Image: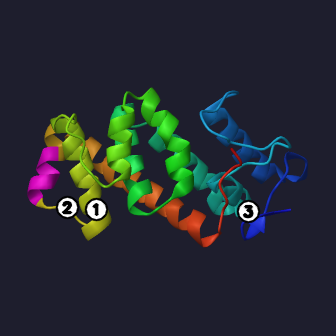
Amino acid sequence: MRHGRIHWYSPDELTPEQRAIYDGVVAKYGTEPPFELFDEQGRLHGPFNAMLAAPGVGASLQQLSAAVGAHTSLPPRIREIVILTVATARASAFEWSAHRPLARAAGLSESEIAALGGHATPDTFGPADRAALEFSRSLLRDRDASDACHAAVREHFSEAGAVELITLVGYYEFLATLLRALRVPLPPE
């Protein structure tokens, strides 16, 4: 069976390298993931199936996914603001769909989520939220950030946080490209 432009891997056909990636993805999201992670046959949705198609790079992508999800100094709210900003800028339906519930769980209101989806800046955003949002938008628009934009991010998130924000934007922008180029469908609702 196909999943967009590539084969859709079932758990019973995985090589040991693919199984390690699969198990890592499932471990990251747990037994009750916040979005449709796999179908009734255990096949992974979204970018995770693509990781299985090329396990040489897929293993590194899975590790980076785990790192940006749990091993940064960034608060969950900030991570989700950035991810939704990338999803909006790159029209990534999968990222938007998967991260809306995570954004709610991280404390974003429905009106804040809707504003991000409309390329707006929510009135309720504080200085740290705004710094992360503007930094992300600058990276997506200009592939760079002004000294003032960078300074605002360093003020709120430190030097390490600035590097983590750049990595987060780059990772989710890469996923958006991967999903689009492979024509990966959204999971059924």
In this picture, residue 180 sits left or right of residue 88: right
Return the residue at label 3: 53
Q: Does the magenta stretch mainly form a helix, a strand or a loop?
A: helix
Report crowding for label 1: few under 14, some 14 to 19, many 20 or more residues within 10 A (C-alpha): some
Identify the element where label 3 is drawn.
Answer: helix
- Tag 1 near tag 2, CB within 8 Å: yes
Q: Quadrant of residue 146?
A: bottom left
Q: Which mark is residue 27?
A: none
| Numbered tag placed on residue 145 in the rendering | 2
Q: CA distance from mark 3 to mark 1?
A: 29 Å
**What type is the residue that disc 1 sits on?**
Leu
Which residue sits at x=89%, y=53%?
A: 13
Q: How is the image coloured?
A: rainbow
Q: Earlier in the sequence, mark 1 or mark 2?
A: 1
Could you give the CA–CA distance between mark 2 and mark 3, rounded to whole angstroms?
Answer: 34 Å
Q: Position of residue 173 (x, y in %)?
A: 44, 61
| N-term mark: 2 or 3 | 3
Badge 2 element = loop
Which residue matches tag 1?
139
Displayed quadrant of residue 20: top right
Magenta stretch bounds: 147-152
- Which of the image's four quarters has the C terminus? top right
Instruction: Evaluate if marks 3 and 1 touch, with contact meaning CB atoms under 8 Å apart.
Output: no
Label 2 Cα neighbours within 10 Å, binned few <14 / some 14-19 / many ≥20: some
- Please tell me which residue is depicted at 56% across the width and 47% down the height of the picture: 63
- In the rendered image of this protein, does residue 161 appear above or below residue 17? above
Q: Is residue 164 visible?
A: no
The residue positioned 53% from the left and 59% from the top of the image is 175
Numbered label tally = 3
